[in-house]
Amino acid sequence: MNRTETIEAVRVDGRGVWIDGSPRTLLCASLFYFRLPREQWRERLEQVRASGYTCVDVYLPWNFHESAPGRWSFEGRRDVAAFLDLAHETGLYVIARPGPYICSEWDGGALPAWLGLDAELRIRQNERRYLERVTAWFDQVLPLLAERQYPANGPVVMVQLENELDFFDCADRAGYVGALRDAALGHGITVPLIACSGQGDLAGATGDVDGVAPACNFYPDDDSPDIEAEVRRYAGLVAERGVPLLITETNRRHRTLRRLLASGAKLIAPYLQSSGWNFGYTPSTGNWGRPGNFMSHGYDFGGYVTSTGARRPEYAEAQVLARVLDTWGAHLALAVPVLPNDRPACDFPTSSVSAALAFPEGGRLVAVPHLGAEPGTAVVGGVPVAVAPGSCPLMAMDVPLGAWGIDATLTLASADLVAAADGVLVFSSDVPVTVVLDGTHAEIPVSERVTVAGVAVVVLPAAEAARLQSVDADGTVRVADAPHPPAESAPTAVREVRRRFDAAPEEPAGRHALPPTLESLGVYRGRGAYRATTDLTGVDELLLTGAADIVDLSIAGRTHPPIAGFGAARRIDVGDVTGSVAIEAVVEIWGHANFDDARLPALRMGALRGLGTLWKVRGTTDVSALWTVHGHWAGNPSPTRVLGGWSSTRVAEPVTYSRTVHSPAPSALHLRGVVEPLRVSVDGGAPATVHAENPWVLLPVGTHRVAVTLPHHPSGPDLRAELLTLEAVRDWSCAAQNDELLAGFAARSGRGESVRLPLALKPGEATWLDIDLPPSPEGYLVRLDATQVRVTGWADGECVGRVWTGDRPAFSGGDPDTLWIPPGWPGLTLLAQGVEGRDAPGIRTLWLEVPTG
């Protein structure tokens, strides 16, 4: 028997989601305690509840609670039990997502950085060493969830295991997910267990393990006409497994959410409706698009609440949709998706496949998405109706109204039904509404009340429907007053700061032959310094390999532009220096990779941070010629060509080029002109994939047979190959500055002097600045008017974020140019560092903005 069919208080089956024996359609907003000040938890939870959403999904990040091996914290802002209790008090259900991997654009996807120090440990696998660590985490967190399951002592109605495992190359999915399931059951989890697929591979996400229900994450183009066709397919696939369509992540626009609802979804959890903040050194790296994006500290993808708690217009859309769900109630929760025979004819762009829900007691709800920008008309059931641009009304057809004490059939209503009472129907629309009731046809203007076949029909504009409070027995519709827009205040300029004389201390971390990783020095978040002296006589360039995340390099007193290549090899010109020189590198961890991106070494899941290896380039040899060809019709003896120079009519089929290279010292083979990924094998070993982002292969001392396999591309760029002979820079002294040490120094007052802005900095120069902030019940957004400066800010003993102005890598997420000082977090201390670039580093002004609520 499938375990999902045996649960009583909360269960899922082929018909839907059941809570206390009643079917429910759940609207769920992501809300993360670890991205908010504890003082704001209740306010944000109440804000979600006031939006009409009935549920929040909550990640629980392992490395937020285990900051170092065996060092656990569930206090203060880490008191997840208190957060869950507040959710319960607020009247919200919770879907708990303890991972162990969560993604969430969070440092390492919440997998602790030190896991990568064990060379035999394989993350996200059915592997003993990893599962032992996961067990320690689950032993801490699952009892908290078990104690707060619904309905006994809390709000938890589902527990998600792992996250989008179908994106990851897991060797034994059934064994791995089965181990997580067994751990959950062993700790007394009785609510449904789910696992979400990120790209629609249900078996890849769940291992098809019994007792783990598959869920889906959808991130379509909001304007795509094909959303319904895709979602309906998955509704059918999960129905075959005896579970409803649970959408655990999707876009935030409510027009899209309505389309998902009409396609059969019983849980809809847009990510991320209630935004937050990546405090500390917790953002991830390597997010989407080209590899190496930095996640900003502001964690905001345009949901209905901003990172500072302000409501966006989409918030009212949430309230209207929530009223639709409340009004239809169990009828909607048990409705099944159907393909209507009479597809609406529209004079505007709409979906390629109609979506409708058939009610169990008769009638249906038809979604009519308007994907254009101009007013339009649809013909529904033979009746022309107005449809507002950008909307998706859920139109009732042939619905008996006996459930509301109305002895009539609603043949058609072209707008959302947001309330119904004895003798009264209330609709939400910004265009006139067509109602056909017991054969009586009426066109009802917005903000009007008309009697149709003895029934009072009221049309509220969407803005008023969002504030609908009640419908009285006499048919009076009560709407709350519109909120007053928050008063906006002009930004305040900070003209004077206090500059400290002291630099932050560092903890000596020993001498090492080669640069160790920061994690091996005990720095899981923060930064470290590497120092060496070496002879560069006769050396014109250096090669840096394996460095991550941000490397500020100084050679012979000359500061170089920051390197943020995530392990890609970087050539560094040193032709203007000679003799014995000092080298210093300060390496800062922005965050560990939250996604397994094979294109760059430091973007692999579990990859460590640090300087990598710095090599002197002792010689460069062109090895583009004398490659033998294997493939297509090339026979024996093998032809000799330049790399990539074989001519063939078999376009796109693989050709292998091989040659012998001699490495009297460690060497690096550089393949220039790589566009498409190719495969490189050394001495017959397992082939490695080489990408345009890092077209290098390191070779040990010796004579090697190198084979390069690439698809034949006659119109592609010329490939060239060069061999760099290397000598490692050795004997490094190291020092550590973890996030706790830096936060502790920021919190202390030290000697300093007042200086007026602007403040000029030299490239590589770092200075600590204290700023007095006037009291503000809303806190502050701090914006820098600066060039070529990287700034880290602290308040109330905690890092509030980092801003990088001027030449910088690409950023993802929210606004990368502001720091947020939450209300009640006293003080502001900045570590400002000049960055080598096109402009001179300096801070002209700091602007304080009061966030609007």
Image (cartoon, helix red, strand yellow):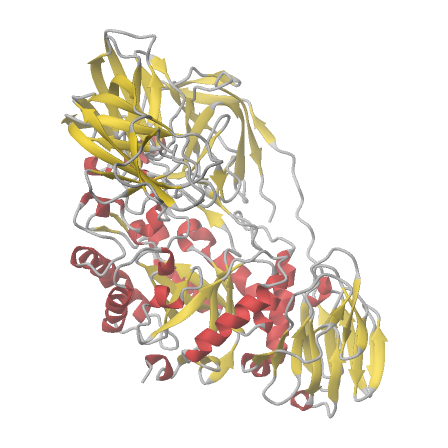
Q: Is residue 623 left or right of residue 432?
A: left
Q: Farthest residue to the front: give it.
A: 636
Q: Position of residue 561 (x, y in %)?
A: 41, 21
Q: Tell me where residue 533 sits by quadrant.
A: top left
Can you say whether 138 is above or below 68 in the image?
below
| Nearer to the camera, 174 or 20 | 174
Q: Tell me where residue 74 sits by quadrant.
A: bottom left
Q: Quadrant of the N terminus?
A: bottom left
Residue at 38%, 21% in the rendered image: 766
| Nearer to the camera, 625 or 348 | 625
Q: Tell me where residue 224 sits by quadrant.
A: bottom right
| Nearer to the camera, 619 or 246 | 619
Can you say whether 47 is above or below 724 in the image?
below
Can you say whether 779 is above or below 413 in the image?
above
Q: Is residue 218 left or right of residue 591?
A: right
Q: Position of residue 743 (x, y in %)?
A: 33, 35
Q: Report the label total.
A: 0
Q: Position of residue 569 (x, y in %)?
A: 33, 29
Work out whether residue 154 can be spotted: no
Q: Position of residue 721 (x, y in %)?
A: 33, 27
Can you say whether 243 is above or below 273 in the image?
below
Work out whether residue 569 can be spotted: yes
Q: Is residue 464 left or right of residue 245?
A: right
